[in-house]
Image: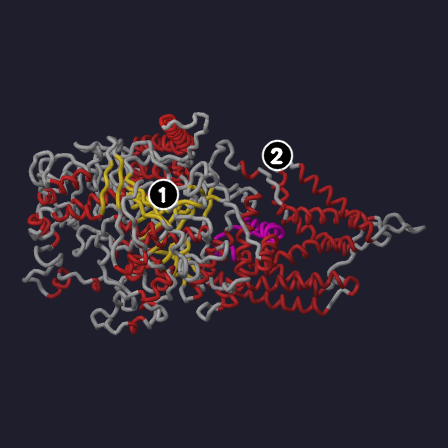
Amino acid sequence: MDSLTNQPSKKSRNASGEKPSIKFARRTSSGRYVSLSKEDIEMSSDVSGDYMNYTVHIPPTPDNQPMDGTSVAMKAEEQYVSNSLFTGGFNSVTRAHLMDKVIDSEVTHPQMAGAKGSSCSICDGKVMRDERGKDVTPCECRYKICRDCFIDAQKETGTCPGCKEPFKVGEYENDGQDYSNGALQLQGPNGSKRNQNGEFDHNKWLFETKGTYGVGNAYWPPDDSDDEAGLNEGVFDGSEKPWKPLCRRTPIPNGIITPYRALIAIRLVVMCFFLHWRVTNPNEDAIWLWLMSITCEIWFGFSWILDQIPKISPVNRSTDLAVLYEKFDAPSPENPTGRSDLPGCDLFVSTADPEKEPPLVTANTILSILAVDYPVEKLACYVSDDGGALLSFEAMAEAASFADLWVPFCRKHNIEPRNPDSYFALKIDPTKNKSKLDFVKDRRRVKREYDEFKVRINGLPDSIRRRSDAFNAREEMKMMKHLKETGADPLEPVKVLKATWMADGTHWPGTWGSSSSEHAKGDHAGILQVMLKPPSPDPLMGSEDDKIIDFSEVDTRLPMLVYVSREKRPGYDHNKKAGAMNALVRASAILSNGPFILNLDCDHYIYNCKAVREGMCFMLDKGGEDICYIQFPQRFEGIDPSDRYANHNTVFFDGNMRALDGLQGPFYVGTGCMFRRFALYGFDPPSGDWDTKDPKHECTDEVCETTPALNASEFDQDLDSNLLPKRFGNSSMLADSIPVAEFQGRPLADHPNVRYGRPGGVLRKPREPLDAPTVAESVSVISCWYEDKTEWGERVGWIYGSVTEDVVTGYRMHNRGWRSVYCVTKRDAFRGSAPINLTDRLHQVLRWATGSVEIFFSKNNAFLASKRLKLLQRLAYLNVGVYPFTSILLIVYCFLPALSLFSGYFIVQTLSIAFLIYLLTMTVCLVGLAILEVKWSGIELEQWWRNEQFWLISGTSAHLAAVIQGLLKVIAGIEISFTLTSKSGGEDDDDIFADLYIVKWSSLMIPPIVIAMVNVIAIVVAFSRTIYSANPQWSKFIGGAFFSFWVLAHLYPFAKGLMGRRGKTPTIVFVWSGLIAIILSLLWVSISPPKATDGEASGGDFQFP
């Protein structure tokens, strides 16, 4: 990785308007060093100018499509860019390291870095290849030459080393698209138009499609047709077709929602009367007990209002994928080949530690993304490796290599789900709904290849270690030989860095196994590798011979895949996951600039291959221009059948989130969310002010439904063009991409009410090929210094300052007036894993609750929201910041039954009729609300009860710890550090629920254990005292015992979790239980010692009050 030139600073380069100069350096297998610059690349485009300037205009027909005009040099540079590992960062030169080998296994797909190809006849390097992996020979003699030697020949003699004649690039370009051997055969709008000989029949195509050569693709009515026929066969007009919406909003049936709202109102009124009665009727015998209880009950009432009132208007939504296809993908007279007009979508996958997030899990997620049902050329997948580990890099490369087989297999047989691990683990008949005769054979072969793929992934740690040990030993021997030749002291120890080595025999620029300076988790350069270069704009069919499966009728292209590891240096605050996501936003804006972004955790894969299309139905429909994101529900696999700890969280995802969808939109919950890139940049939603921002943009009657593309400064009246670097950084490419992303993300202007739309067909143009300056710019924007003195993390991108950056980011968008949508698909859009172990689950909840406490004490508190945030939405966000504080009063309330039983007093003076009526009415309303909520949300009563149980478990453990940690951070400035939630790698095949029975002690378990033990002891003490009392007061005992049993019933899953597998209770539980029992017994004896009285009866008769 030698650098041959110095890169100018970003500021000077942007000021002068020059592109960065990037140098390539490669060491070939023969030992020859080859260096090439951008200027060398451009030289090849100046050759044979006479040929290149001579063009022939031929009308386009289905078998004669115009070429993209990409020259040999541009193809070669794109190939070099995709084969280069770019590194750079603070005070360092951006380097492009050409990699002949990315992984140890063989790579065959032409889009992938390090793909197998023919050898150069001069230097044994790889020859240039086209998008199909065919050799690019720039001379008619077909002399195989690599790009290095081609540039050298151009500079030295200008002649081909093979035939000794001048290169004839023009002739090569004319025959560049060879459609033999199963290549693409373009069809007309109505299918194949071939004659009996298999050749294209022009007359048949012209007749059946009413097509004519000449102006564009428009077709005109015959001269002898009448007016009515002319309307049917004339120039295509989209207004002739009835407009259809892409999505529909379905309200909840009145038979369910009306009683639901009525019960909310009734319970609210009854609760107010009950609290008034409780305040005006204190318990004079135990005023301290009454005061604690009434304080808790008032707070619980306030908390119930915050949680329940935003649920008064839940909605359901549905999409129409057939209409989406008709509007954007269907062949038409203007688009006979059916090239998609859908906007691009960039998918983000984040990982940080391959030890806690198994590489196989991440690889399966990537494979599900690459196989998604969306136009291939519109997709780009970015993987953020925040740990900078070579293990993650090579696992991703292995996934890209296996995708060469897996993705076409999924397309050929319509496989669901497209995560290979989940697909092959299905317990259903795999042949169901499969009609192709070769499916069983194909599946068997792919299953064998996947098993080998898993073995390679699992063997990567040992492979990397053995490789590094071998190279380090070689370097040590070289050093010893050098010391011997120089006459150094032979007894002096040889000092060689224990580096981590890549497959091509060079140092890994990221984190090493043995950390050293500039190669540690918090100290390494920025790394960017285009694993799969952007695909060609048109389908590329496979062949029957080049793969183990016949893909002759399947598009074999793969989406663009990019590995990103942002630069990390000591002394910089990297802002955890939020900082990594912002780095991906900037890098993707320069490389692909998809107007929409879908982010996934590494353990959440695409379960529904049409999920991206489902989200686009909302974004591209009428009124979709003010939608900032589409949140999908989170669904989980590997949960125990009883869902002991409410891991599915269905009450929240199917109840609360669906209810918020009827307001301003659901919260952003971290994964499975499709963003509008323009909204992430911190701009306000479209408004009427846009029409007056630029007087040059005038709307005529013909195009009044569209708004021209604006500049970034025109979106925000407070943002001047000179202030763009202050908000977004000093990358001019990033600033230029903003208006492009905004315009491409607009809905189609196919309805009069679509005010901020775009014309149809503008997104069918192929994207520009990648070049070295573009990739180098993307490396610079992921450097550790780029965000200094900018608004990244404050207004732009993911917001910093909270461990729950997802909720804060969504809140900021809603606070600017955007709205969000909740997309519940018939088939789950995404599925992931969740911790089923009690300790892991409590720590996960602790992280969420701590983030909520941080939100409450920050400027993101809903009390401080703007007027654009609706009232009920404000209450919902206020509840997010308030709910952890309920734990303080909840713990007190859980001790009240025990205190009542110990003291012999109850929270009320007597069990009066008024108290019982109020209590019964609120209980009936609560049960009725639960039943109706189950009806409109689709959850089950068992799931609702599990949620209630875990609410008390987490409220008495994790939420209390979160409040304490949050207060420590606010008052004392003590930072909070969290560990990653472990992702199960499926190591225990005998019992997939093995983690459920593992008991890992945590201090979070202390409060629930104390509460349970105190209530059990209190019930025993009170029962014994009541039985042996002369005047037993069973009414007080039953009142206290009822609430104690209510607490214990909620803690049952917690107690069962402490038992472990088959009732094996850890010793620590017995120790804590014994200590607590002894302490409480001594405390009670000291407070209320027993008094012996003569003649007192030793027992009493049992009777109900």
State whether residue 614 appears in this view: no
Which percent across, then down, holds residue 256?
Answer: 49, 60
Which percent across, then down, holds residue 495?
Answer: 43, 32
Identity of the residue drawn at 16% across and 47% down: 43
Please indicate whether residue 597 sits to the left or right of residue 1097 in the image: left
- Indicate which label's residue lies in the foreground, 2 or 1: 1
Q: Amino acid at mark 1?
A: Ser
> Neighbour class for label 1 at 10 Å: few (<14), some, many (≥20)?
many
Count of numbered tags:
2
Q: Which residue is mark 1?
A: 368
Q: Which residue is mark 2?
A: 1062
Q: Amino acid at mark 2?
A: Arg
Identity of the residue drawn at 8% across and 57% down: 214
Please indicate whether residue 340 sits to the left or right of residue 689 in the image: left
User: Mark 2 to mark 1: distance in Å?
Assistant: 38 Å
Q: Nearer the viewer, residue 545 or 103?
A: 103
Q: Nearer the viewer, residue 618 or 428?
A: 618
Is 945 magenta? The answer is yes
Q: Secondary structure at mark 2?
A: helix
Q: Nearer the viewer, residue 170 or 155?
A: 155
Whether residues under marks 2 and 1 lie with C-beta atoms below 8 angstroms apart, the answer is no
Which percent across, then down, holds residue 28?
Answer: 25, 34
Is 582 magenta? The answer is no
Quadrant housing residue 474: top left
> Neighbour class for label 2 at 10 Å: few (<14), some, many (≥20)?
few
Q: Nearer the viewer, residue 1043 or 700?
A: 700
Between disc 2 and disc 1, whose residue precedes? 1
Magenta span: 933-959
Identify the image's colour scheme: rainbow, by chain, secondary structure or one colour: secondary structure
